[in-house]
């Protein structure tokens, strides 16, 4: 069973996305920031990382950048509720750093699931 | 009968006596003349005394002689001249009337009579009265008073120290006979001398006075010069003041502090208030104010301030034509012609207040933007959970239950919240747009295409899109402007239906025809007009429609962000939006975007340097005009172009004639079969035929998706001719 790591500081959001992905048949690991996320990625067999961008301690852009450098084949989906300059700016940045798909919060569940299936099945 | 000898002798003697008297009389006459003449021939009293002495010596022995003058006020006798055998000094005899000594001179003055006295008689006198003599006792002494105007002025005296018979009564008579002349001569000379002294004194006085006068004259002249200079300075100063007053840019008025009657106004005041000078000076201060009570209070403050300037930040005034305006007033009181006056300068601050209001509005918008951007992130996270959990809950509920219906309502509400956050985010990042040259007509057509699908059939759309002009803008934002305006228009007609009209045309404004001089500059503009025939906007709220969160829609149906986002975008592009509306008569929004002299247009004339080709290209775009324009562009580059405006037809054509096309260029957003589906179908038929996908401004497509569908390139409109020519050539060369 493919395993997906969700990195997000919003507990409720993590819980919701976990349920959505578990129902779609995936195994889930959760982390509340980039540090914890990196640690889990390095200790567990993770097939796909879904990470938020704006988080305390270690935020998403830095996490993507580090993971991508260490593991060039890593599959990452970036999600964001946006910030002062709106979601696109951060998400565009994430995309340039190597996120394969980007989604603005609130998520379109079908599109997210479609992207996850596509990336896991590759 | 002959006289006898005795008689003859008597006769001779008489004749001799007669002759002697005659000689004596003649001598006296000569002396008198000499003395009289001396008055005019001598230069001073001393000389006169000497002359008198000499003249008298011809008729009498004056070996020991003196002239003493009596000073009644000083009670003294001053010996003015003397000739004496002794060496005694003749001093002034003071306090003569009370002296213990016997002065013969004073005795003559006192008695006013001549005196002849011998030594023995004098000594008997002294003994009798027990007094001492003044000076040495002579053998004989004669003294005669000198009278003038019946007053004794002095004494002439002669004496002998040796011969007691030196003088007789005859000598006394002789001296008495000349004494009047002597007195007169001395008096005259004295008078003449006094006169001289006076004259000299007067002369000195006159000289001094003249000198003083000359000095005074000089001072006076200096004062006159100073006054002239002061007058000239005053005149220059007055002139300068008048020039300053007259040419002062602020309206300046002078009026009486008590009567408030205007007395002088400058040109700026005439222009500002619209009165002539004659009309103005017939008015009073409160006649040009709309706040009469405030005028009184303000004027009292000015009067109490002495000469300090009093500033009134805002006071409302009225002009001759009745128009009112806010003015900033600076006033001060001063005295002139014995009365208190007030000078006030008034500056029309209408523009400043408006700018301040605009600035406050801009700051408010910026603050809202910052705040909105800040909260949007958290809000999106919350919405994510709400939507996500609701979807999960829906999954777990049975179809057609009340629970599922309710959960769908939660979804609808969440979706509205998501849209609102999206609007707020757009609003908050107005300044961070990605501007490029945009041909608006393409965006307008695409937007209308999207709208048409969603509008009910009761709303008709008319469009008149004429202009090819380009502007500098973020295509996404322009799309949003059009969508927001058209959505508002359709909402206004949703109940009764109507016509939505969208026009696009070029306009040019000079400084006279410009609709709002302050908002935009003269020049070429692209005018986008969106009109509807809906319920219109009431006059009372038309000034507030661009305020963020202002909405007329029922609670929960509108965010109030739409028009403020539109306004913000247009203002950022140095454009202008003007609303025209009346209740029940529909609304029209006229938008003016500044046109750029586009590179696109310039480059179309520069075809010679662009990479060209002769290959066959299939071009698909459902927008007829865009397709036609693209065809012309490709033709100008030398290519053989087949145009299709229906994607299904295009697919069918390619299915049968795939070998005839070296390249397919297709729009992404098309009805029936979209550009990405068409691309995949084409690749299925002939994977080697290169496909270029292009889209409007708004459609975002992931690179991964492009790879998945197999497109060789993806470009967004507007496409510059030189870039397009280069891209086509590159792709064709790669395949070949």
Image (cartoon, helix red, strand yellow):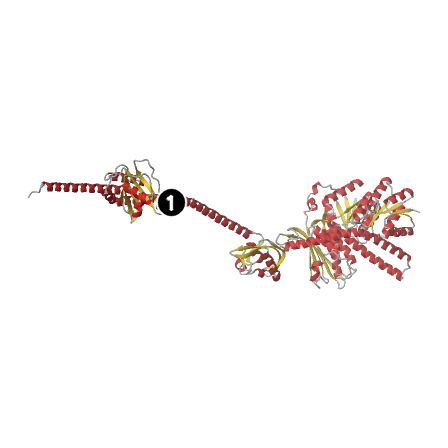
How many numbered badges does the structure rendering display?
1
Left or right, residue B533 beside residue B59: right
Identify which residue, A103 or B305, lies in the foreground. B305
Expressed as whole percent of the image width and height from the top left, the position of residue B171 reads 23, 42
Q: Neighbour class for label 1 at 10 Å: few (<14), some, many (≥20)? A: some
- Residue ID for mark 1: B206
Name the spot of residue B692 as percent of width and height, x first: 79, 46
Horizontal and vertical percent position of residue B565: 74, 54
Q: In which quarter of the image is the C terminus of chain B?
A: top right
- Image quadrant holding the N terminus of chain B, namely top left
SS at circle 1: helix
Along the horizontal axis of the image, is B616 left or right of B97? right
Residue B445 appears in view: no
Residue B118: x and y in percent read 27, 41
Residue B503 lies, with reference to residue B155, above or below; the image says below
Residue B598 visible (yes or no): yes
Q: Which residue lies furthest to the right in this view?
A: A1
In screen coordinates, is B345 left or right of B397?
left
Q: Which residue lies furthest to the left in this view?
A: B1
Front residue of B441/A62: it is A62
Q: Which of B432 and B113 is in front in this view?
A: B113
Near-viewer residue (B136 or B357): B136
Q: In which image quadrant can residue B122 be found?
A: top left
Chain letter of disc 1? B
């Amino acid at each position: 069973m493919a395993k997906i790591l969700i990195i997000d500081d919003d507990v409720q959001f993590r819980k919701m996305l976990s349920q959505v992905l578990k129902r779609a048949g995936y195994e889930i690991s959760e982390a509340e920031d980039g540090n914890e996320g990196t640690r889990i990625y390095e200790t567990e067999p993770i097939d796909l990382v879904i990470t938020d961008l704006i988080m305390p301690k270690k935020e998403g852009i830095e996490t993507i950048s580090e993971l991508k450098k260490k593991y060039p084949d890593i599959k990452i989906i970036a999600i964001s509720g946006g910030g002062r300059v709106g979601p696109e700016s951060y998400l565009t940045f994430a995309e340039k750093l190597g996120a394969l798909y980007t989604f603005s919060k609130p998520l379109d569940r079908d599109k997210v699931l479609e992207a996850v299936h596509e990336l896991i099945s590759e | 009968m002959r006289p006898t000898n005795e008689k003859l002798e008597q006769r001779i003697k008489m004749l001799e006596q007669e002759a002697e008297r005659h000689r004596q009389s003649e001598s006296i006459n000569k002396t008198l003349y000499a003395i009289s003449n001396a008055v005019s021939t001598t230069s001073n009293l001393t000389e006169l005394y000497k002359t008198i002495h000499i003249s008298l010596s011809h008729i009498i022995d004056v070996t020991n002689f003196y002239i003493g003058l009596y000073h009644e006020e000083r009670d003294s006798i001053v010996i003015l001249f003397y000739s004496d055998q002794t060496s005694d000094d003749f001093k002034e005899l003071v306090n003569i009337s009370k002296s213990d000594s016997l002065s013969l001179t004073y005795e003559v003055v006192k008695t006013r009579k001549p005196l002849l006295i011998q030594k023995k008689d004098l000594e008997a006198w002294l003994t009798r009265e027990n007094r001492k003599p003044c000076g040495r006792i002579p053998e004989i002494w004669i003294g005669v008073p000198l009278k003038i105007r019946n007053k004794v002025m002095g004494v002439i005296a002669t004496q002998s120290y040796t011969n007691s018979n030196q003088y007789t009564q005859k000598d006394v008579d002789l001296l008495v006979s000349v004494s009047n002349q002597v007195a007169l001569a001395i008096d005259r000379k004295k008078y003449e001398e006094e006169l001289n002294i006076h004259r000299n004194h007067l002369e000195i006085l006159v000289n001094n006075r003249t000198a003083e006068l000359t000095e005074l004259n000089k001072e006076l002249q200096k004062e006159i010069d100073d006054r002239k200079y002061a007058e000239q300075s005053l005149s220059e100063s007055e002139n300068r003041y008048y020039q300053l007053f007259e040419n002062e840019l602020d309206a300046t008025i002078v009026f009486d502090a008590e009567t408030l009657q205007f007395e002088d106004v400058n040109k700026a005041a005439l222009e500002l208030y619209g009165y002539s000078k004659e009309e103005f000076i017939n008015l009073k201060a409160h006649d040009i104010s709309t706040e009469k009570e405030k005028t009184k209070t303000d004027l009292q403050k000015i009067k109490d301030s002495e000469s300090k300037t009093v500033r009134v930040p805002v006071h409302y005034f009225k002009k001759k034509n009745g128009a009112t305006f806010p003015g900033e007033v600076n006033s001060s009181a001063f005295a002139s012609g014995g009365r208190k006056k007030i000078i006030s300068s008034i500056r029309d601050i209408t523009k400043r207040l408006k700018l301040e209001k605009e600035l406050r509005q801009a700051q408010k918008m910026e603050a809202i933007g910052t705040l909105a951007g800040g909260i949007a992130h958290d809000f999106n996270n919350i919405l994510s959970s709400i939507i996500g959990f609701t979807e999960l809950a829906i999954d777990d509920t049975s179809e057609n239950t009340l629970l599922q219906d309710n959960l769908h309502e939660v979804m609808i509400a969440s979706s509205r919240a998501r849209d609102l956050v999206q609007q707020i985010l757009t609003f908050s990042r107005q300044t961070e747009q990605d501007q490029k040259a945009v041909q608006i007509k393409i965006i307008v057509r695409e937007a209308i295409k999207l709208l048409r699908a969603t509008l009910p059939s009761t709303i008709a759309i008319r469009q008149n899109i004429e202009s090819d002009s380009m502007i500098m803008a973020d295509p996404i934002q322009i799309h949003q402007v059009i969508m927001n305006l058209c959505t508002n228009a359709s909402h206004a007609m949703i109940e009764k239906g109507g016509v939505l009209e969208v026009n696009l045309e070029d306009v040019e404004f000079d400084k006279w025809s410009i609709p709002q001089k302050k908002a935009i500059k003269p020049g070429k503009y692209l005018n986008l007009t969106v009109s509807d025939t809906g319920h219109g906007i009431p006059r009372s709220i038309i000034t507030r429609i661009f305020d963020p969160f202002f909405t007329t829609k029922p609670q929960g149906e509108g965010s109030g962000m739409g028009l403020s986002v539109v306004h913000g975008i247009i203002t950022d592009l140095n454009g202008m939006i003007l609303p025209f509306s009346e209740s029940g008569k529909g609304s029209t929004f006229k938008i003016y975007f500044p046109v750029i002299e586009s590179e696109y247009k310039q480059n179309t004339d520069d075809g010679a340097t662009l990479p060209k080709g002769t290959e066959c290209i299939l071009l698909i775009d459902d927008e007829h005009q865009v397709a036609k324009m693209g065809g012309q562009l490709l033709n100008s580059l030398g290519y053989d172009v087949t145009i299709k405006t229906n994607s299904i037809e295009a697919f069918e054509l390619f299915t049968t004639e795939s070998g005839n096309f070296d390249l397919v260029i297709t729009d992404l957003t098309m009805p029936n079969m979209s550009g990405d589906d068409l691309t995949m179908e084409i690749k299925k038929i002939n994977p080697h035929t290169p496909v270029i996908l292009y889209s409007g401004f708004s459609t975002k497509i992931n690179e991964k998706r492009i790879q998945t569908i197999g497109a060789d390139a993806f470009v967004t409109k507007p496409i510059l001719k030189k870039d397009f020519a280069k891209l086509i050539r590159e792709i064709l060369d790669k395949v070949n």
